[in-house]
Amino acid sequence: MKKTICVLLAAMMLCVAFAGCAKPVEESQPETVQPNTEAVEEVVEEKEWFDNVTITISTVDGSSYHLPFYIAEKKGLFEEVGINIEYVGFPGGPVQMEAIESWDIGTTGIGGVLNCLIGHDGILLANVREDGASQNFWAYNDSDVVTAGQGNNTLSDQIYGSADTWRGKTILCSYGDVKHYTLVKTLEGFGLTLEDVNPLWMDASSCLASYWGGEGDITAVQGSANWDADVNEKMTKVSAATDMGLGLYGSMVANKDSLADTNKADAIVKVIELYFEMMDFMADEANWTDVVNYMVEYNNWCGIEGDFEKFENQLKTGGKFFTLEDQVNVFYAKSENSDLTIMADSIADVLKFYEELEVWEAGSYEKFVQPEHFNTEILQTIWESRTAE
Amino acid sequence: MFYKNRSKSLFDKILYWVLPAFSIVCLLYAYTRAVKANPMVMPGFAEIGERFLDLSTKPIKGVTIWGHVLASLRRVLVGAAASWVIGIFLGVFTATNRYMNATVGTLITIIRPIPGVAWVPLIVVAFGIGEFPKYLLVFIGCIFTMVQNTYSGVYFVDQSAIKVGKMFGANKFQILTNFIIPTAIPAIFAGIRLSVSNGWKIVLAAEMMGATLGIGAMVTRGWNELDMATVICCVVIIAVTGALLSVAVNAIERVLTPWNR
Amino acid sequence: MATRQEKLQEMHKQYIKTERNKTLKLFLISIGSVIGFFLVWELLSIFGVTNLRVLPAPSSILDAFVEKINSTAPDGCTIMQNIITSGEVALLGFLLAACIGIPLGLFMGWFEKADRFISPIFEMIRPIPPIAWIPIIVVLVGVNMKARAIIIFLSSFVSCVVNSYLGIRMTNPTLINVAKTFGARNVETFFKVGIPSAMPMVFTGAKLALTGSWATLVAAEMLASNAGLGNMLTIARKVSRMDIILLAMVIIGLIGAVLLSVLNALEKRKMRWKSNI
């Protein structure tokens, strides 16, 4: 009896030991070009060198906001200056912000920015691209909303339908995020409110599936499905956030502890500098094919299927990427309405909307506009060093 | 069952094999109907097969699907093993010591009804999405079953056997190791079996809601992109792995407790 | 003689008294430890030892509860609406699973032909964890109460069938032989001997099914729903309101415990004829 118990205990301890010792499969980085170490040695004297600092960058998997980072890494620019990049990709926004302790900087959409600054004390660094590229509403080609044609909406001529055709429709949408905002704005342009339609709230990824299953008249479509071949053939985009010029911006945010960490602070500035260098690379028409190929590669690595055409459309129609010049000339100007910069003000507008909807609780606006949530020094440092050259 | 000793006629013997085959055919037919009803979303068998090969060879986030399965298994095993050690300890103590039962036992009874799934957001906020929070979640999912089963096993030990031990002058520790724990072993193993299956379920939940590596995360990835072929492949793999896990635990139990047949 | 009897009675009374005191003492210790737990938590929050972003104080959870009684923010339903929605679906799925699963399990366990036909289908459904069904069901049926009920059904169904099957298979052969001697046919024995003797396992299965279905419901609501307690949790994540998240956890736990105790009480009443549970 005693022997068996000893055997049992030993077996259990072995299990624990083996399981604990087994190396967790680290998320491997995308293959990086190995620069010739000798060449680097020579260059090192001229370039700055960060002593193998590790910066963790987060994003939602496959997001185009992350593309400049991906390109910089593939070109070996981070390795040249001695920065190790760890990538952590999330399936969605809320999780990314909840896990803020595990990353240093990240790119996210507008919902994520609000969540980050208000709920998790993050810091807003820069705007990245117009958000809203994937905040669209679609309907079947033969729906009466589509046949009613465009041009009846005060906010945008691209929106299909009219007040009568939209009234009473069953609309599949996700609650409390940008699609909700887009829907309300679209209805505003027709002079309608949410009361005039029949919204079915559900998780964003289920909207399209339910629509194809026969539910609803109009649906929101999430993420890269907006450029899916099936969707584009059988359905028409009846409302798009980008068309309405809603001023939704995807942004870069940072973990405040990482910025305060003296070991990492300079490396973070360098990383962002390289980000905007790649942004300029992407803005150059000559590099277009390369850029799309990088996007395809990145998405396939994350497990998102798609070919050249699909991602080309996503990059083309998704809205403008903001270069450093855009940031400094436009977004750092103070807004007329408030003490904030134009960039922060436009985000605050969305927040006010959510407060009205009672999604964000009252008092969130005050929490949001705290000055420690905004960091403009990094961008200005980068801009100055660039213009000084 | 009543007439199981009756010899079987030829008709019965044929039916013995025809019936299962027929039911599988019904199942496949039901699936084809589902595909026809939802052609844009539900993939046909060819597509599923193709995607399966794809997943096995092409890595996503650096590992093929089998790497993801191994990652999930690792999390289950570590979390479950930790829950066995601590669960048996707590179970034995709450069952033998009434004061422990009143304090720690009550707290456990209060926290137990919260489903493991509901813990995910709290743990993610507190610990991020590394490996430790996953182990912790599996641990939380498994430990309550373990404590409960060990408690029943120890509590219902035959008191007369213990009295015999006392008569022979055994002290408390000797009674514990020679009488109580051996009698409770079947219950403990039942607890281990249950906790492994619970652990498998909760690791899936944890990964579906906040992980980047692991088979649950693959399901979420497929679902977000409406890639149902991937989802179905992953669900099948999940089912098979779960079944194999139960079989393995049962086999280990048979090896370690041969007297318990 | 009289004095010895009196002495024995005295000792007996003393024994009962000390036992009762001990039970009372333990009961008070239990309550005390729960209160102590919450007090310690509250004190840690007040003194800033715990990170309030991660773990709000119990008082803020109470505040959130009071707030949610009337307010529909942030997820669009008050707390009673959420509880009713969740409760409805859980009970519906569970009752459906019990009504279909228990008879099916009993039937399969007794009649071999039924077993051979249904087993393969069942063994394919069984290893799939309920949470893995969610994407498939959502895609097939949509995001509505029907989908959630189906998911709960699938989760509880397995438990009920397996336990009923095992329960009836464990019928004491002696009892069956006695019935045989008295000339009962197979079907009659099934109803009069098999089913009653399987009842304890059936109840175990029902209890497992209920707790399982409640956990699956929460998962289903967190992933694919627009109302209910799990949905409240998910939306609270979007706006990072940890107090609502914890409130949801507490309420989910409470209701799960209540459901289980109802089943326990039911079992005790039905099983009175069984000497030991």
Image (tube, grey):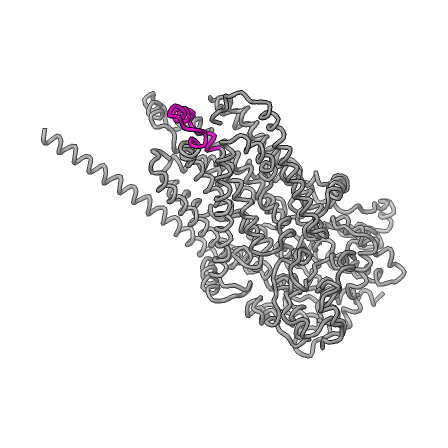
Residue B97 place in picture, x, y as percent: 37, 36
Hey, which quadrant is residue A228 in on the image?
bottom right
Is residue A83 one of those drawn in magenta? no
Depth check: give the residue in front, A158 or A235.
A235
Residue shown at 50%/21% (left/top)?
B5
Tell me the magenta residue range: C166-189
Depth check: give the residue in front, A75 or A27.
A27
C202 in relation to A56, above or below: above
A335 in relation to B131, above or below: below
Residue shown at 57%/22% (left/top)?
B9
Return the residue found at the far right: A286
Residue A101 horizontal side relative to residue A36, left or right: left
B23 in relation to A165, above or below: above
Task: Quadrant for the C terminus of chain C, please.
Answer: top left
Return the residue found at the far left: C2
Residue A6 place in picture, x, y as percent: 51, 25
